[in-house]
Image (spheres, rainbow, N blue to C red):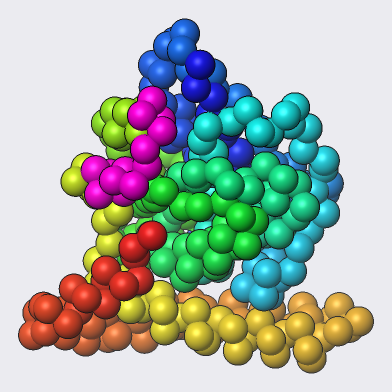
């Protein structure tokens, strides 16, 4: 019998729905056992994020990868698993705090050591920087990445900013008269079952070398150049803001509150005023330099 351990964190359950769809009827295969393990912070983050200040308050710790305390994970004999699937999401261009806290824990080392790992993301549309950190953290556990599947919101960047804030802060996921549904589309979640075949074939053959190539043929990773470049630029600026907030407001909650407010204004200014121009420049570069930009895409998105 082949055994899969799915480890995930998800506030809304979106990532779990995605993974369930990826594995689809493998659950009924009597030669496969799938166990689910949810990462749980000792103090859960609010969902929806009310008051909204809580949503912005996790910014510095997300970017600088400051751990939260997690409840102990109970895994009986982690040696028995043939494959680990990690379900995750991005907070402020970084792995969410529960995910990075888990990946840095001793428990992660025990569970992932020497195991093939597939990462499955449920994000808005900016995951490349987080993925770099996740790859590094998985390597540090002794696990090895054999696949990456990314699900994101395919609506226009400026629209999905509005719908995700509406969902995460106001709890309204469904479409309104003006805006579409927030998050990964229902169709994309349903169609995720197309990834089952390569994953299960690799699992049965205990041969994962070719898995990512097979997953890519099914569009497991879809990213537009201008989104990636906007994100990579954003991550550099996020690092500066996060350092500044953590340094300047140590033991001073009211200063932290003010700096976070300033950061929030800055964030929306950059998204709606600066990023459209930057995007345009990156789109032109993509058209003019297809080979060079393709290389950049590959370099930043490969395993
Ligand atoms: C605090 C916070 C920051 C986020 N930042 C990003 C981001 O930088 N890039 C992105 O693609 N999605 C971002 N998201 C969306 C999440 O990646 C994810 O899609 C959404 O929160 C649903 O995840 P869930 O599975 O925990 O419900 C953010 C979400 C939260 C809560």
Q: Please tell me which residue lies in front, 241 or 303.
A: 303
Which quadrant holds residue 198? top left
* Residue 24 visible in the current orientation: yes
With respect to residue 96, does 238 lie above or below? below
Residue at (18, 73) in percent of width and height: 294
**x then y, percent, for residue 173:** 47, 42
Residue at (26, 77) in percent of width and height: 296
With respect to residue 33, does 12 lie above or below? below
* Residue 48 visible in the current orientation: no
With respect to residue 68, does 13 lie above or below? above
**x then y, percent, for residue 92:** 55, 68
Count of picture labels:
0
The stretch of residues the image draws in magenta is 203-215
Which quadrant holds residue 36? top right
Instruction: Give the position of the C terminus as an image quadrant.
Output: bottom left
**x then y, percent, for residue 135:** 51, 62
Residue at (29, 46) in percent of width and height: 210
Q: Please tell me which residue lies in front, 265 or 32.
A: 32
Residue 107 part of the magenta segment: no
Q: Please tell me which residue lies in front, 3 or 56.
A: 3
Considering every residue shown, the one lying at the far right of the view is 251
> Seen in the image, is 136 located left or right of residue 157?
right
**x then y, percent, for residue 255:** 81, 85
Residue at (41, 18) in percent of width and height: 26
Q: Main secondary structure of the magenta part?
A: helix
């Amino acid at each position: 019998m082949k055994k899969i351990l799915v480890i995930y964190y998800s506030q809304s359950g979106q990532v779990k729905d995605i993974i369930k769809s990826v594995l689809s009827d493998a659950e009924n295969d009597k030669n496969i056992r799938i166990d689910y393990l949810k990462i749980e912070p000792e103090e859960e983050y609010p969902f929806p994020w009310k008051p909204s200040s809580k949503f912005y308050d996790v910014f510095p710790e997300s970017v600088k990868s400051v751990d939260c305390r997690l409840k102990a994970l109970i895994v009986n004999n982690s040696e028995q698993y043939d494959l680990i699937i990690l379900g995750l999401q991005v907070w402020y261009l970084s792995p969410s705090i529960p995910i990075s806290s888990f990946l840095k824990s001793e428990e992660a080392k025990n569970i992932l050591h020497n195991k093939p790992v597939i990462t499955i993301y449920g994000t808005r549309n900016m995951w490349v920087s987080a993925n770099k950190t996740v790859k590094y953290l998985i390597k540090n556990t002794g696990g090895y990445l054999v696949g990456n599947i990314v699900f994101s919101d395919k609506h226009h960047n400026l629209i999905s900013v509005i719908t995700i804030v509406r969902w995460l802060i106001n709890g309204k996921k469904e479409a309104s008269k003006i805006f579409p549904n927030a998050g990964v589309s229902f169709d994309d979640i349903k169609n995720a079952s197309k990834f089952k075949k390569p994953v299960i074939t690799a699992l049965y053959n205990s041969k994962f070398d070719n898995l990512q190539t097979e997953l890519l043929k099914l569009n497991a990773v879809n990213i537009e150049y201008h989104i990636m470049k906007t994100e990579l630029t954003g991550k550099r600026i996020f690092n500066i803001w996060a350092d500044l907030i953590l340094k300047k407001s140590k033991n001073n909650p009211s200063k932290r509150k003010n700096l976070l407010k300033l950061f929030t204004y800055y964030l929306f200014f950059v998204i709606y005023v600066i990023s459209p121009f930057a995007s345009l420049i990156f789109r032109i570069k993509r058209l003019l330099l297809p080979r060079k930009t393709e290389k950049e895409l590959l370099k930043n998105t490969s395993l």
